[in-house]
Image: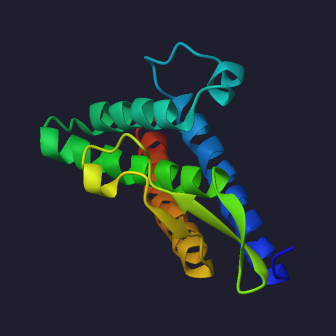
Amino acid sequence: MPDDDYVYLLGASLFVFNRFNQFMIDLLRHDPNAVKTWYELMDTPSKTIVNRLDAFICRTYGVKDKEKKEHAANELINLVERRNRIVHAFAVTDKGKQVLRTKTRHNLPDPEKRDQQFPVTREFMRDFISDVKDMDYKLNDFREYLRSHHLG
């Protein structure tokens, strides 16, 4: 088994993202265009949740600029992709200890970046947790906007 702090960070990474995913779903339930129930949304892939939430946010704030829309979506999609790298990691022995390694996706647009292996380090997980928390604050601002405008 890996060191206890490594396992703790792995569990914390997954827990923080799962809570964040639930938060995104809760926000989507305030979208007047949403047609899915909470149960259906819980079974929806995170990337689809992100795309729907991004569209809802942009519609609510009246964002029409393509670059601004893409920037917001990319921030959220990046978190999903990083979570996926953790979830789809594989165990290896490195210097006599069990750790995780992962790889970049096989279908990235840049062939040089495809299928590149890298370790899931403590720093990778700490950064991921921190970035999820940062996005959580931003989405909380959106929730407050919905409340202040009686939309949520």
Say how many tags the image has: 0
In the displayed structure image, the side of residue 34 where residue 122 appears, left or right:
right
Q: Residue furthest top?
A: 35
Res 75 seen here:
yes
**Based on the displayed image, in which of its 4 quarters is residue 124 positioned?**
bottom right
The colour scheme applied to this rendered structure is: rainbow
Q: Quadrant of the N terminus?
A: bottom right
Q: Residue furthest bottom?
A: 95
Res 152 seen here:
no
Residue at 48% x, 36% y: name it. 47
Residue at 57% x, 31% y: name it. 45
Q: Position of residue 81 (x, y in %)?
A: 48, 50
In the displayed structure image, the side of residue 119 where residue 62 appears, left or right:
left
**Based on the displayed image, in which of its 4 quarters is residue 61 positioned?**
top left
**Based on the displayed image, in which of its 4 quarters is residue 43 positioned?**
top right
Q: Position of residue 25 (x, y in %)?
A: 59, 35
In the displayed structure image, the side of residue 59 where residue 129 appears, left or right:
right
Residue at 40% x, 39% y: name it. 149
Residue at 20% x, 38% y: name it. 63
User: Is residue 91 depicted above or below 79 in this figure?
Assistant: below
Q: Position of residue 42 (x, y in %)?
A: 68, 29
Q: Position of residue 20 (x, y in %)?
A: 60, 51
In the displayed structure image, the side of residue 145 where residue 70 appears, left or right:
left
Of residues 126 and 6, the one nearer the viewer is 6
